[in-house]
Image (cartoon, rainbow, N blue to C red):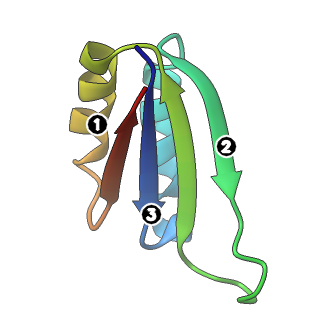
Amino acid sequence: MTVIVGVKLPDKVCNSIKFQEILTEFNCLIKLRIGINNSSIFCNPEGIILLQIENSENALKIEKALLNISGIELQRMIF
């Protein structure tokens, strides 16, 4: 099973350090990371990142840690 976790950071400047620390902590569980840039809005403060994680159990660990970041939004797709 593959899980794609979509992460929306409301303020990527303020939250990027904490976000990166969490991704570094769980780097062995993340197969792919893609950042999506909204180029139609100059200096958009929001960030959207997609994470590919091998199974639901690992995804849950990462999601739990990410939800400690203020204002973060998560969505999940399972294949």
Q: Residue at x 78, y 78 (%)?
A: 39
Q: Quadrant of residue 37?
A: bottom right
Q: Position of residue 31 (x, y in %)?
A: 59, 19
For marks 2 and 3, give the CA distance.
13 Å
Distance, label 1 to label 3, CA atoms, is 13 Å
The kind of residue on which mark 3 rests is Leu
SS for tag 3?
A: strand
Question: Badge 3 is on which residue?
Answer: 9
Position above or below: 51 against 6: above
Q: Quadrant of residue 34?
A: top right
Residue at image position (56%, 65%) is 47
User: Mark 2 highlights which residue?
Assistant: 34
Which residue is pictured at 51% across the width and 49% down the height?
17
Q: Label 1: which residue? A: 63
Residue 40 rendering spot, x and y as whole percentages: 76, 87
Front tag of 2 and 3: 2
Label 1 environment density (alpha carbons within 10 Å; few <14, some 14–19, many ≥20):
some
First of labels 2, 3 by sequence position: 3
Q: Is mark 2 on a helix, strand or loop?
A: strand
